[in-house]
Image: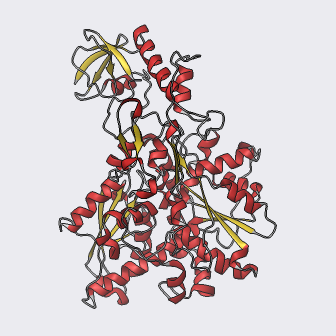
């Protein structure tokens, strides 16, 4: 343990702790711009400088480790002047368009400028050249707003193992972007949006489809339906000042009706469908391996996270046969809305407009994949992020706090608690095990409150095993089999897990991968700024939503049973294969 003082307050922290974290322990806030939790601190922005007794130069607190007897001051005149100069220099280069910028309400640079009392800029001269990149469906880049903090570079390389962005050039001419400063569409970008989630300004944001959705709502010839992902209900409230982890399911439903959607549905319904299809697929693969003794791709990997699918297509094409053929719940919903639901209404697929509200920017890409047209037209027409929905609600003048709690519409609005936990890392795995175990044994999963706790939480890679005993006669070949599963979130963790599987170091039957840290609750389209405290609060809220439901297993959803009886027939049947399953392709950058 190291003993030091910060602003004359004694502090004791473990060796290796940075000054920034030591200050947080005693309630001293040091401003930062380049620092991001979980990432290697690089001290690039110099906003977090502090004065250390005996040192000539100011030190970056995010990267400077504490030392025994160190005396630190965080608010001297010298420190304040240094911070102001750094921020003034950033502002002098920043082509911000602040009046119309997408980040004008939550811009960290603006907030820091106000905090430091900056009323004028001492430096004049050339601004960074503006260059707009709208080459991908998910993301938009504005080079003129970039402050070169390198947060996006660190997240893309360290958390996601993608490396689509990098610093190029030197000094004023430094540019952050793809190799040779090309468009994002020309490199292996998975469009996860984690860069947009950590960008402190408006240099990287989601591509907005708000106007497209408004146009559809205003079109009298369109029947406009909306689906909401499970992660939205635990995060949307943050757009209106609610604490992270506040469940706003009922208010969200009411707000969507008041925006003018003709029907408000739940992606959770097709999350339940996904579990039934995916569990059936897993059991079919196990039968092929254990009974038929035929080669089959195991372990089976989940397929509901589009950033992970792109990552596999770009970086690990050899495992594409291992991916579940199930579409994501978003795309299953679109296909069913424009077929099953359209038949009930007596309209054509073209008359229905399907909007999605997702925590994810990669969903904007996913809905435009050419194979996602099982209904004969594009199955999902537009994807909004959580942030975009918040903007639409405010633009419509809706008092979110005053809204009543309302229920979603039938038939695509009823879901189980198992569908809710799709939002969390480990949730898809737990939901699948709840169903698969009961199908095989006729008994509920023998876990405390149905929770598979080894796959919960924020560890990067998690493992569990479930032993099958007393299987039903049709599944007797599984008696005594220890089903081994794993869960990874964040693509760097997924990469390491895949490498271990390919090297024969790990053997599993089923693997869940979520693109974003924490799962969908930490998606690139969620309210900023997401750190582990926010992730934990959202995760806890989703588990509360699950535990508060009477239905907690996907296969028990009565609306799902009706869907199969009236329309699909059976899991993995001909119609479900056409509407609910897909294929993948190896990719290389353009």
Residue 169 higher or lower than 249, as above or below: above
Residue 500 image point, x, y percent? 22, 63
Q: Is residue 302 above or below residue 61?
A: below
**What kind of colouring is applied to the model shown?**
secondary structure
Image coordinates of residue 438 in percent, x first then y, are 42, 76
Residue at the image point whose x is 43% and y is 65% from the top: 428
Please identify the quadrant where the N terminus is shown: top left
Residue at 59%, 16% in the rendered image:
119
Q: Residue at 49% x, 50% y: name it.
A: 524
- Residue 117: x, y in percent? 56, 16
Horizontal and vertical percent position of residue 510: 33, 70
Question: Which image quadrant for residue 209?
Answer: bottom right
Which quarter of the rendered picture does the C terminus lie within?
bottom left
> Is residue 551 something one can see in this rendering?
no
Dividing the picture into quadrants, the one containing residue 456 is bottom left
Viewer can see residue 134: yes
Whether residue 339 sits left or right of residue 541 in the image: it is right
Count of picture labels: 0
**Residue furthest right as drawn:** 220
Left or right: where does residue 10 sit relative to residue 173?
A: left
* Image-based side of 47 in relation to 287, left or right: right
Q: Nearer the viewer, residue 559 or 451?
A: 559
In front: 270, or 352?
352
């Amino acid at each position: 343990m190291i003993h030091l003082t910060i602003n004359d307050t004694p502090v004791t922290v473990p060796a290796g702790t940075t000054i920034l974290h030591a200050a947080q322990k005693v309630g001293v806030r040091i401003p930062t711009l380049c620092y991001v939790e979980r990432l290697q601190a690089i001290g690039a922005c110099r906003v977090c400088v502090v004065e250390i007794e005996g040192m000539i130069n100011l030190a970056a607190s995010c990267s400077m480790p504490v030392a025994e007897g160190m005396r630190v001051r965080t608010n001297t005149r010298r420190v304040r002047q240094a911070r102001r100069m750094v921020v003034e220099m950033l502002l002098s280069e920043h082509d911000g368009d602040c009046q119309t910028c997408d980040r004008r309400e939550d811009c960290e640079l603006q907030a820091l400028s106000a905090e430091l009392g900056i009323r004028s800029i001492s430096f004049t001269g050339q601004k960074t050249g503006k260059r707009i990149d709208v080459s991908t469906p998910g993301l938009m880049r504005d080079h003129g707003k970039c402050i070169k903090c390198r947060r996006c570079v660190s997240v893309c390389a360290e958390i996601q193992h993608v490396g689509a962005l990098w610093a190029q050039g030197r000094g004023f001419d430094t540019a952050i972007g793809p190799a040779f400063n090309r468009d994002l569409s020309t490199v292996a970008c998975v469009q996860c949006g984690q860069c947009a989630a950590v960008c402190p300004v408006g240099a990287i944001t989601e591509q907005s489809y708000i106007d497209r959705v408004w146009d559809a709502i205003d079109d009298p010839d369109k029947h406009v339906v909306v689906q909401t992902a499970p992660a939205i209900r635990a995060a949307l409230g943050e757009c209106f000042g609610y604490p992270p982890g506040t469940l706003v399911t009922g208010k969200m439903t009411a707000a969507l009706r008041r925006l003018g959607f003709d029907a408000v549905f739940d992606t959770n319904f097709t999350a339940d469908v996904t579990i039934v299809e995916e569990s059936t697929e897993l059991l079919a693969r196990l039968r092929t391996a254990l009974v038929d003794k035929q080669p089959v791709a195991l372990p089976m990997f989940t397929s509901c996270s589009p950033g992970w699918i792109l990552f596999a297509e770009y970086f690990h094409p050899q495992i594409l046969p291992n991916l579940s053929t199930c579409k994501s719940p978003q795309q299953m919903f679109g296909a069913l809305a424009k077929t099953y639901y359209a038949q009930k209404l007596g309209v054509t697929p073209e008359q229905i407009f399907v909007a999605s509200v997702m925590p994810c920017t990669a969903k904007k890409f996913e809905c435009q994949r050419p194979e996602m047209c099982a209904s004969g037209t594009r199955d999902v027409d537009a994807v909004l992020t959580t942030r975009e929905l918040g903007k639409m609600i405010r633009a419509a003048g809706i008092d979110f706090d005053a809204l009543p709690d309302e229920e979603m519409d039938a038939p695509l609005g009823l879901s189980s608690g198992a569908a809710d936990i799709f939002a969390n890392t480990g949730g898809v795995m737990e939901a699948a095990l709840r169903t698969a175990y009961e199908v095989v044994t006729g008994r509920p999963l023998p876990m405390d409150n149905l929770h598979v706790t080894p796959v919960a939480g924020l560890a990067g890679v998690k493992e569990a095993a479930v032993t099958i005993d007393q299987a039903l006669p049709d599944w007797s070949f599984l008696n005594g089999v220890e089903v081994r599963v794993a869960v990874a979130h964040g693509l760097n963790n997924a990469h390491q897990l895949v490498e271990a599987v390919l090297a024969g170091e790990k053997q599993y039957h089923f693997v869940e991968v979520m693109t974003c840290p924490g799962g969908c609750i930490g998606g690139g389209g969620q309210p900023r700024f997401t750190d582990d405290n926010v992730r934990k609060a959202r995760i806890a809220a989703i588990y509360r939503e699950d535990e508060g439901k009477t239905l907690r297993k996907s296969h028990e959803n009565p609306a799902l049973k009706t869907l199969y009886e009236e329309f699909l027939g059976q899991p993995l049947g001909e119609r479900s294969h056409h509407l609910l399953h897909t294929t993948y392709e190896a990719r290389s950058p353009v």
